[in-house]
């Protein structure tokens, strides 16, 4: 999944480095808000997959692509719609920076919420 996204981004930045607006607005462009939500989910699922794939037997049966496509299924999107929207937004660096700033902010909030949760002590005594 990371390779897919990184490949698309590299290709997009290659096109945008020419100084022309290479990506036309696609007919089924994903809204900025929805794009932020999708990217947050992609990053969360990638982190879960990378951190647990060797320690969880069930996860070893899946690939990064399975996680990627499950997120697209969650949002009822075809991969072509997501990819063309990603290419469009990334062809506009200022717009893409705004989107990713929101993604990073949401991920930071999630991280802070998780770190605030207090861990419950395990009661090792048997209750009879």
Image (tube, helix red, strand yellow):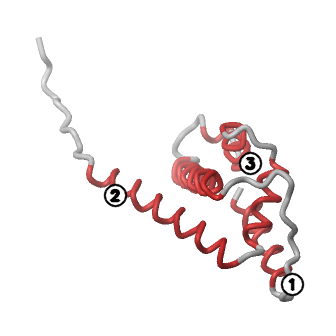
Secondary element at image label 2: helix
* Residue in the picture at 68% in, 54% down: 31
Residue reaching furthest to the top: 128
Tell me what residue is drawn at x 39 percent, y 58 percent.
Answer: 109
User: 12 or 2, which lies in front?
Assistant: 12
Mark 1 residue element = loop
Indicate the position of residue 100 as horizontal and vertical percent values: 58, 68
Find the distance from the CA under tag 3 to the CA under tag 2. Answer: 28 Å
Residue 88: name its quadrant.
bottom right
Residue 47 percent coordinates (x, y): 54, 55
* Front label number (1 vs 3): 1
Q: Position of residue 93 (x, y in %)?
A: 69, 78
Check disc 2: other Cα within 10 Å, few if <14, some if 14-19, many if 20+: few
Please give the label number shown on residue 112: 2
Give the labeled residue for mark 1.
20
Q: Which mark is residue 65?
A: 3
Decide: is 93 above or below 68: below
- Quadrant of the frame with the N terminus: bottom right
Q: Earlier in the sequence, mark 1 or mark 3?
A: 1
Label 3: few (<14), some (14–19) or many (≥20) C-alpha neighbours in 10 Å: some
Name the spot of residue 87 as percent of width and height, x first.
79, 66
User: Which label was assigned to residue 46?
Assistant: none
Depth check, front residue: 118 or 76: 76
How many marks overall? 3
């Amino acid at each position: 999944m990371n390779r897919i996204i990184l490949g698309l981004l590299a290709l997009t930045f290659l096109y945008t480095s020419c100084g022309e607006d290479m990506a036309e607005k696609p007919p089924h462009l994903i809204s900025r808000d929805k794009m932020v939500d999708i990217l947050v989910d992609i990053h969360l699922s990638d982190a879960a997959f990378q951190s647990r794939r060797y320690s969880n037997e069930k996860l070893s049966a899946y690939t990064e692509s399975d996680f990627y496509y499950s997120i697209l299924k969650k949002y009822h999107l075809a991969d072509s719609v997501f990819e063309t929207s990603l290419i469009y937004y990334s062809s506009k660096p200022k717009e893409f920076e705004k989107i990713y700033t929101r993604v990073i902010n949401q991920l930071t909030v999630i991280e802070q919420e998780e770190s605030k949760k207090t861990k419950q002590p395990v009661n090792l005594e048997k209750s009879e």
